[in-house]
Image (cartoon, coloured by chain):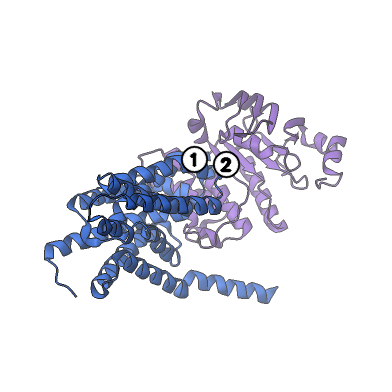
Amino acid sequence: MINNEDIIELQDIETIYEGEKIPVIHNINFTVKSGEFISIIGPNGAGKTTLLETINGLLSHTNGKGFVFGKEIKKHKSEIRKDMGYVIQNFEMDPLAPFLCRDIVMSGRTGKIGTFRFTTKKDWDKVWYSMGLVGMVDFGNRPIGKLSGGEFQKILLARALAQQPRILLLDEPFSNLDYAARMQIETLLNRLHEKYGITIVMVSHDLSFVPNRCNRIVVLDKGSILMDGKKQEILKSEIINKIFNGNGKKK
Amino acid sequence: MINFPLSLLAVSILGAVLAGFVCSTMGTFVVRMNLASIGYLMSHAAFAGAAFGLMLSIDPMIGALIFSFLTAIILGPLAEKARLQSNVVIGFLFSFMIALAFIFLNYIPGQAASGTALRILWGSIFSVTYNDLLLLFLLSFVLIVFIIIFYKELVAVMFNRKLAESSGVNTKLFYFTVLFCTGFAVSLSLRIVGGLLVFALIINPTSTAYQFFYDFKKILIFSPLIGIFSCLLGFYLSLMSDFPIGASIVIVSALFFAFAIIISPKRKVNKKKRIRLLKTS
């Protein structure tokens, strides 16, 4: 359920990569209310991942002001991150990687538990609960490198959920997945939003997979916000047709 | 086989065990964090540093520490931001460090220079001093405490640095801790294993353990065990055959690795999976 608390607030944000002169994103102004489900869409190179990384503080913005939970991102990033789950774009995992799924899910709680503190039974309960939410309880003792793309994505999602986040940042959660796996992840996101009211900010370049529960779309192009509005309005607009060639595929 | 006094043997065996422990423990992090190239350079910088120390008639270990730390400080940030093309930099710096080492060795004062220089180059288990043992023991203790206290952070960072950072882990701190501890491990083991081969003791035992386990905890337990066993067996081989100690240790650890690749259950599973996929496609 959406309430009036501005959980993310960005004012004139500009981010430039170290050693470069041209900003990847600029003049970014938008707020996210607690409980919203937002899709940030745009073609490759539009600055979507940079925007997510700026919100998380992984990238430091060079201009403007950014607030999460009412706290300035630059000054309080380690504090903010404890309540912000982040799922990075599906990456290829070494099949011999020496990690079990349960340990990866637990690693999501690292910041939350804090330095000089050991994991407790309570933490493990949260890990198994998160794995249950994504339907992966049976995979706890499986090696991470042996999972399919969809299963791996679910474990990354469970990792973020184990953090018990107030905000979930998802970077291309459907990329490199087959149709069935995409449907599973979409259903999962809809359920998480409906049942737990987590604020979700999702980045995607694919218009054909905008989850039902997503109520707002922000269109990003060439580093700035082109449109920001309700899903139905945005998807019908001509600008979207221009950017995505009218059929949901990138130009 | 020559008969050695028991105390000398005990010091040498303890030195081999501790060097095996510190190097292969650091190996678990170096291998996983793709720091092999920078670690390789650090070990050769330590060799040049040891030669520099000998030239100035100071403890070679101090020279080794200074040179390996300087490498970590200068190249660490570059490697971290992926601005280091490892094959180019290794090609350039490896030869540069070795050239520096040979120049320094050439200027070592006194008649005993050639023997000392060779010990730094090939390693000599009997040149281990009580001071070396004490430092190796301290580093081993620090590493054990570090791993126990920061195990959860280490798993997070070893899996994916970006994800770990996004969850609130100070990954930069762990990255540089790993680099500096590797510098320590290399510099303290230099006299035993030798400057040219010490890096093999970091890579080989971990690579062997990787062939058998999917659990990072088991890698952290078995990699040092394989490292220690390689050192002890290498020491025995060196005594029996009069091979240089460093070369013996590396040969043993390399044989373990080769054997592990042949019998690795992980690779068998992957092979079966590939055959199954080929049949179905």
Kindly identify which chain the residue marked by label 1 belongs to. Answer: B
Q: Residues within 10 Å of mark 2 (few under 14, many from 20)?
A: many
Q: Is residue A99 visible?
A: yes
Amino acid of disc 1: Pro
What number is the disc on residue B281? none
Left or right of residue A78, residue B256 in this image: left
Whole-percent x and y of residue A132?
Answer: 53, 52
Q: Quadrant of the C terminus of chain A?
A: top right
Residue that label 2 marks: A86
* Both labels 2 and 1 in a single chain: no
Q: Height in image: B174 above or below A75? A: below
Q: Height in image: B66 above or below B24? A: above
- The chain drawn blue is chain what? B
Left or right of residue B147, residue B14 in this image: left
Mark 2 vs mark 1: in front: 1
Nearer-the-camera pick, B113 or A98: B113
Q: Colour of chain A?
A: purple
Of helix, strand and loop, which one carries label 2? strand
Nearer-the-camera pick, B260 or A30: B260
Nearer-the-camera pick, B229 or A44: B229
Q: Is residue B174 visible?
A: no
Whole-percent x and y of residue B258?
Answer: 44, 72
Left or right of residue B96, residue B110 in this image: left
Amino acid of disc 2: Tyr
Residue at 68% across, 26% down: A30
Kindly report the distance in space between the C-alpha atoms of the residues bearing marks 2 and 1: 25 Å
Whole-percent x and y of residue A59?
Answer: 58, 34
Q: Residues within 10 Å of mark 1 (few under 14, many from 20)?
A: some
Residue that label 1 marks: B77
Q: Quadrant of the N terminus of chain A?
A: top right
